[in-house]
Image: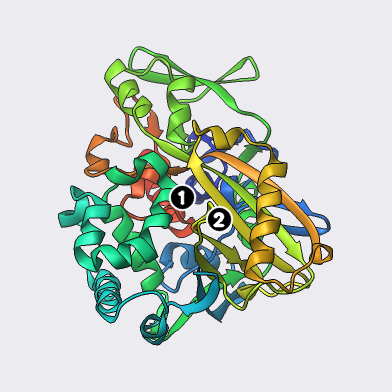
């Protein structure tokens, strides 16, 4: 007998939960605070172009994502592109991302280059992350690559993403990020990344349609204000002042919101959720008349730029105009996060003109900024051991977000795989 199950959040993980529940004969009711599905993968109207607010790309190893495309008949919408990486350092744009680029890189000794390359290579070969779980990341990288390569190639990346959290991150978590990019190569010299025709929206809308065709429902612009519990059992959810009964609730919203809408959880569980840290993002997207560079991914190490890099999206997915994403990560408590969009937009105009002096103000067609308060969990050593179990000590309640597939970094494929498994576990 199918069950009516509340799903909180319509990002990729929430959609995957609902998708699996609907396929297994249940009726998911999805509650989403935003006016559209997708969470961080949602699209917006960028002066006539429908595009994601935050960039995404796919790797050959994204099996859970590719499986869903197959099930929905979308496999032929997948495109693979050979992409390039670059490094902006000492006021020059250098190729990056393969052994030749590393050897030719100006600003590092040969020994430092060899140590850096060996570390990256061994990361892609390693499969067991457990030994790195309780190791602090910056010390681990420095021991491998040495002080010079740390200073030139790594330090700013940490400083401008994690700020005061830099010195207490899990090496396993950083390793998984190095490995993911490393494994998207089909040879040491060439990197292949993928995009979906029409962007993530193609998948999001197909999943939504599939869920609805099987009886599932979406309640957009409907944030759940409280998960109702009685003793140790879920009773339902409260939305816009109205109570709705459910025997089961599966939450995929960012963990920092959980204590707010589930104040009746046992105090030890609440304390675990409340102690988690996150960084925010202000992501600026620029539409240009000409290309910035020929790279998809551009790392930056420049004393005048408070970013670790940027993504020139149209060097992966060709569009009529050139699209560049510039993410500014920082803890939400950082005073910089309260700067206006105009401040970030002005920085981006300055940075892009510095990287490509051929760009003039008239080449900027449009520039926008989006913000996401809980963009990225901060995973410190031993992270997973401190998270509450997905199935909470309240009957009928499951809670997870992208933190739960640690040490993997947040990604659409990981969210889909985790969400589907959670749906199967919860609907038994």
Picture residue at 29% right of the left edge, 32% below the top:
388
**Mark 2–mark 1 CB contact (< 8 Å):** no
Circle 1 Cα neighbour tier, 10 Å, few/some/many (<14 / 14–19 / ≥20):
some
Picture residue at 50% right of the left edge, 75% below the top:
85
Cα gap from disc 2 to disc 1, whole angstroms: 12 Å
Residue 92 rendering spot, x and y as whole percentages: 54, 74
Whether residue 384 can be seen here: yes
In the displayed structure, 297 sits above or below 410; it is below
Instruction: Choose the circle earlier in sequence order: 2 or 1.
Output: 1
Classify mark 1: helix, strand or loop: helix
**Residue 47 shown left or right of residue 102 in the figure:** right
Q: Which mark is residue 51?
A: none
Query: As rendered, which of 380 and 395 lies closer to the eye?
Result: 380
Q: Which mark is residue 160?
A: 1
Q: Which mark is residue 304?
A: 2
Looking at the image, the residue that sits furthest to the left is 131
């Amino acid at each position: 007998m199918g069950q009516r199950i509340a799903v909180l959040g319509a990002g990729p993980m929430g959609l995957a939960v609902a998708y699996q529940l609907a396929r297994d004969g249940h009726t998911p009711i999805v509650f989403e605070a935003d006016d559209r599905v997708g969470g961080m993968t949602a699209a917006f109207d960028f002066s006539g172009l429908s595009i994601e607010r935050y960039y995404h790309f796919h790797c050959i190893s994204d099996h859970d994502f590719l499986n869903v495309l197959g099930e929905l008949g979308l496999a032929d919408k997948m495109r693979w592109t050979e992409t390039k990486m670059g490094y902006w350092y000492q006021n020059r744009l250098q190729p990056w991302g393969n052994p030749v680029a590393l050897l030719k890189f100006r600003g590092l000794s040969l020994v430092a280059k060899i140590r850096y390359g060996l570390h990256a290579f061994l990361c892609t070969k390693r499969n067991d992350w457990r030994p790195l779980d309780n190791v602090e990341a910056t010390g681990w990288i420095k021991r491998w690559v040495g002080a010079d390569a740390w200073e030139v190639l790594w330090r700013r990346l940490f400083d401008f993403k994690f700020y005061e959290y830099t010195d207490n991150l899990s090496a396993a978590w950083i390793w998984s990020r190095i490995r993911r990019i490393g494994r998207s190569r089909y040879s040491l010299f060439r990197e292949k990344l993928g995009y979906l025709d029409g962007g993530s929206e193609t998948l999001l809308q197909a999943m939504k349609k599939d869920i609805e065709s099987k009886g599932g429902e979406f309640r957009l612009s409907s944030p759940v204000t409280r998960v109702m519990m009685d003793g140790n059992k879920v009773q339902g959810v409260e939305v816009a002042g109205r109570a709705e009964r459910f025997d089961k609730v599966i939450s995929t919203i960012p963990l920092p919101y959980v204590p707010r809408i589930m104040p009746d959880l046992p105090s030890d569980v609440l304390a675990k959720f409340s102690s988690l840290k996150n960084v925010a993002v202000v992501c600026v997207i620029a539409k240009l008349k000409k290309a910035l560079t020929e790279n998809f991914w551009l790392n930056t190490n420049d004393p005048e730029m408070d970013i670790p890099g940027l993504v020139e999206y149209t060097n992966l997915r060709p569009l009529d105009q050139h699209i560049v994403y510039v993410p500014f990560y920082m803890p939400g408590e950082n005073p910089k996060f309260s700067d206006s969009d105009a401040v970030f937009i002005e920085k981006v105009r300055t940075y892009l003109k510095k990287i490509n002096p051929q760009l003039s103000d008239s080449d900027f067609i449009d520039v926008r900024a989006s913000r996401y308060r809980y963009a990225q969990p901060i995973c410190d050593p031993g992270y997973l051991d401190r998270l509450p179990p997905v199935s909470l000590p309240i009957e009928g309640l499951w809670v997870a977000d992208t933190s739960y597939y640690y040490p993997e970094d947040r990604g659409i494929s990981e969210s889909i795989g985790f969400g589907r498994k959670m749906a199967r576990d919860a609907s038994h």
